[in-house]
Amino acid sequence: MAGRTLYDKIWESHGVGILPTGQTQLFIGLHLIHEITTAPAFDMLRENGMDVAFRDRTFATVDHIVPTDVRQRPFLDREAEELIQALENNVNQFGVEFFGLDSVNQGIVHVIGPQLGLTQPGMTLACGDSHTSTHGAFGTLAFGIGTSQVRDVLATQTLAMDKLKVRRISIDGELGTGVYPKDVILYIIRRLGVAGGKGFAYEYGGAVIDKMNMEERMTVCNMSIEGGALVGYVNPDQTTFDYLKGRPHVPKGDAFDRAVDYWKSVASDGDAKYDDLVHYQGKEIEPTVTWGINPGQSVGVSEKLPKPEEFSDPDGAKKAYEHMGWQPGAPMLGTPINVAFIGSCTNGRLADLRAAAKIAKGRKVNPAVRALVVPGSTEVKKLAEREGLHEIFQAAGFQWREAGCSMCLAMNPDKLNGREICASSSNRNFIGRQGSPQGRTMLMSPAMVAAAALNGKVVDVREYV
Amino acid sequence: MADIVEITKISGTAVPIHGNDIDTDRIIPARYLKEPTFARMGDYPFFDERFDSAGKKKDHPFNDPEYKGASILFVNKNFGCGSSREHAPQALYRFGIKAIVGESFAAIFAGNCTMMGLPAVVVAAKDIEQLMKSVEDNPRTEYCVDLESKTISFGNQKIAIDLPETYRTALTKGFWDSTALLRSNLEQVKRTAAKLPYITGFTS
């Protein structure tokens, strides 16, 4: 019998049974919730007199709507205030543990899960947010769900699911200096397409991934959904176990050793059978920047912007150029920017802030650029301040903010205005994503964002490292 | 619980929206996700593509009186990619869309549609071209999406549609509203959980 993948193993151990639809009823080991996608789900529980089936496997925080400058309650935005109150009422009524604004554990849901050791290998994990694939960095089967599914997980701790295929993506060799995990995932999406992962879970491996620390692996897994894959994961290894040891929700003593045995057992077997295999060389990957309106529309920083005819969907590329106001053939280097945003569930962790601070240290943000650094969690903020990163950023002219989703998605006061162009460490360059229907987003690594902020234009970060 | 509702046929006029990779931020801008219920989502689909910053109507199929009252939406590839927000299919549904026919759909979007009883069905590229042309030639054309025969028909034409068999069963047998079904297995769920080492605290 051929070996099994991590995906196969977790799927099998979490299957409750086969439903009349032919779908599997899958047990969800950890349910993370936040303010945006849950209110109608709790309403439905109330209407039907249901409780939360596994309260101790459910944790809540607030991230999307949180203002990152003045956090005083009530929020100035009346709608945001009502939404956070709805969540507060729901967690109180249903008895769910909540990391609210005043909690040291508050932060972006995909930052705090790992930080607290809630996210562990060999689990299933669901959250009403498409970037839930982030947690796959731990060898967790983690995926984003809609509100009706949030309702099902609250009411039953299960979901009706169809099994995915597994594509192993191996990044071999090593990365060049100034090339970061963000460049790796942007490169993968560029090569396989924004819909290329449909029907697949992505297993990331190879020497480049093996060498990454957990925060770096999270960046890669985070954007799986931007490549169309619901799930992305890395097999757990010693790096994973070392990260988890001592975290609040991780077992201690002998139980930790037994946990490690379990975690090792869920990794894909050496002879596991995959539905597809893809290999890339780390040295092929340059610092990468998006030029269009989806995360697959990117180039290496030294390249020129591509011609629409080079794409299978030339009309899509033309629409992107129409929105961005640029011309095919223009160099990516030197593209002007107005705003720089460092943060988000993709790149708002300590490793990201360190990489950006290294570039910013002793330099000044171009006076024409509005530059923000937004830590991914209150804990990340604390740790960064302990190392003095905030002083480096502030001295350079970056604003240093409180934890939240901030300018990734414009559900809080941090937004683009008009036609502004933002160099952003977030995950989506969709039209209107950062709050202005005319606004423009260029995705890149936090170090590249910092370098762009200093210069007021896209530069090659390799000149700084 | 709500009664079981079987969804087998959706009939009506249609509206086309051209373009691949239309993401859920475009279908519903994030600012509307601050509303605590889905009740008003029908006012917002494609809002920033339908209205300028002064609230003036722009040229968009959802603003076009020719397509008023359409219940079937025609789209191209990878429709609904990006954010998992169920607000996107809710906005379309509450606007009046009761079935979506396209070349392909993003995974979370298609799952969300099914869970709310909104079929998202796939046709071949040449067929969506034909369907879009037919509705553009005559917006009053009546279509029927039939999940049992797996076809969409109009005039004397019949075109094959596809969707995952599990989704088709969920819709046609009324299992799409899944909570009651899943909850009926709660004892088995507890037994499955009890076998997972992380649920039992790695005790042995």
Image (tube, coloured by chain):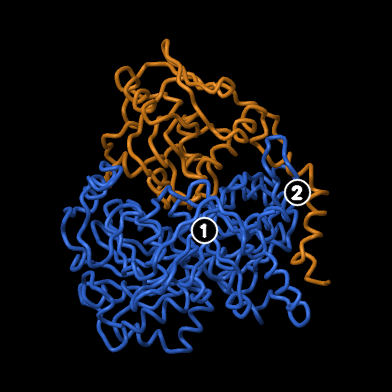
Chain colours: A blue, B orange
| Pointer 1 local density, CA inside 10 Å: few below 14, some 14–19, many at least 20 | many
Report whether mark 1 lies on the same chain as mark 2.
Answer: yes
Label 2: few (<14), some (14–19) or many (≥20) C-alpha neighbours in 10 Å: many
Q: In the image, what residue occupies the spot 65% across and 64% down?
A: A59
Check contact, mark 1 vs mark 2: CB within 8 A: no
Task: Answer with the quarter of the image where residue A22 lies.
Answer: top right
Where residue A168 is drawn, which disc sits there?
A: 1
Q: Nearer the viewer, residue A210 or B135?
A: A210
Name the mark nearer the viewer: 1 or 2: 1
* First of labels 1, 2 by sequence position: 2
Q: Is residue A297 left or right of residue B69?
A: left
Name the chain under label 2: A
Residue A58 coordinates in the image, percent (x, y): 68, 61
- Comparing A253 with B109, the one in front is A253
Under mark 1, the amino acid is Arg
- Residue in the picture at 39% in, 39% down: B77
Figure check: A253 above or below B2: below
x 69%, y 33%: residue: B2
**From the viewer's perspective, is residue A42 above or below residue A71?**
above
Identify which residue is drawn at 42% across, 52% down: B31
Q: Secondary structure at mark 1?
A: strand
A117 relative to B2, above or below: below
Q: Is residue B66 visible?
A: yes
Residue that carries the numbered disc 2 in the rendered image: A16
Q: Quadrant of the C terminus of chain A?
A: bottom left
Residue A267 image position (x, y, % from top left): 64, 65
